[in-house]
Image (cartoon, rainbow, N blue to C red):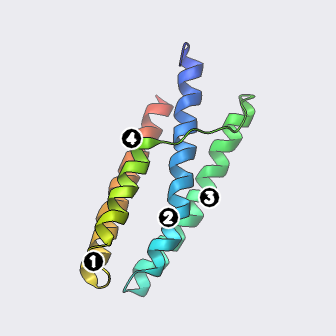
């Protein structure tokens, strides 16, 4: 439980690390199921961006003297779970790609809001 602003800041960083981790794990799986080379490449590029974010966040925790013991962000887990469940209904095609894009945008907006909260 956060008792100070520092505790809250650490918690926000941990949630961001969790979100980055979950997305890094899912994006290559999604990339394999795309119908277009462009979307495949974009999803794999996001893996590299997520890895860079993960490293930066890990360094922030380290600088604060915090261990890397990160709980699961249930918010991002839910968003990504919705995506994977819905994709089962669309095994191939442009509609499947549109589902991926829409859900990855939701996840990215979730992370942007979390970064804003951690920054403020």
Real-space Cα separation, disc 1 to disc 2, in angstroms: 17 Å
Q: Which residue is mark 1?
A: 90
CB atoms of marks 1 and 2 within 8 Å: no
Real-space Cα separation, disc 3 to disc 2, in angstroms: 13 Å
Look at discs 2 and 4 and give the one toward the viewer: 2
Q: Secondary structure at mark 2?
A: helix
Q: Position of residue 49 (x, y in %)?
A: 56, 61
Q: Which residue is mark 2?
A: 26
Q: Nearer the viewer, residue 96 or 110?
A: 96
Q: Nearer the viewer, residue 92 or 111?
A: 92
Q: Position of residue 75 (x, y in %)?
A: 40, 43
Instruction: Identify which residue is drawn at 28% across, 85% down.
Output: 93
For disc 3, the neighbor class at 10 Å (few under 14, some 14 to 19, many from 20) is: some
Q: Secondary structure at mark 4?
A: helix
Instruction: Identify which residue is drawn at 57% across, 38% down.
Output: 71
Instruction: Identify which residue is drawn at 62% across, 56% down.
Output: 52
Q: Earlier in the sequence, mark 4 or mark 3?
A: 3
Q: Earlier in the sequence, mark 4 or mark 1?
A: 1
Task: Using the rendered view, name the quadrant where residue 82 is placed.
Answer: bottom left
Q: Secondary structure at mark 1?
A: loop
Q: Which mark is residue 46?
A: none
Q: Position of residue 48 (x, y in %)?
A: 59, 65
Q: Nearer the viewer, residue 51 or 3?
A: 3
Q: Which residue is mark 4?
A: 113
Instruction: Identify which residue is drawn at 29% across, 66% down.
Output: 86
Look at discs 4 and 1 and give the one toward the viewer: 1
Q: Earlier in the sequence, mark 3 or mark 1?
A: 3
Q: Which residue is mark 3?
A: 51
Real-space Cα separation, disc 3 to disc 1, in angstroms: 28 Å
For disc 2, the neighbor class at 10 Å (few under 14, some 14 to 19, many from 20) is: some
């Amino acid at each position: 439980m956060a008792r100070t602003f520092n505790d809250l800041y650490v918690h926000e960083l941990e949630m961001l690390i969790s979100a980055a981790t979950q997305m890094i794990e899912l994006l290559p799986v999604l990339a394999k199921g795309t119908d277009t080379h462009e979307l495949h490449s974009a999803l794999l590029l996001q893996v590299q961006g997520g890895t860079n974010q993960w490293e930066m966040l890990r360094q922030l925790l380290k600088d604060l003297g915090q261990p890397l013991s990160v709980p699961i962000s249930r918010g991002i887990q839910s968003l990504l779970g919705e995506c994977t469940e819905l994709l089962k209904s669309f095994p191939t095609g442009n509609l499947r790609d549109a589902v991926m894009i829409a859900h990855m945008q939701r996840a990215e907006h979730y992370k942007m809001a979390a970064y804003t909260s951690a920054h403020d």
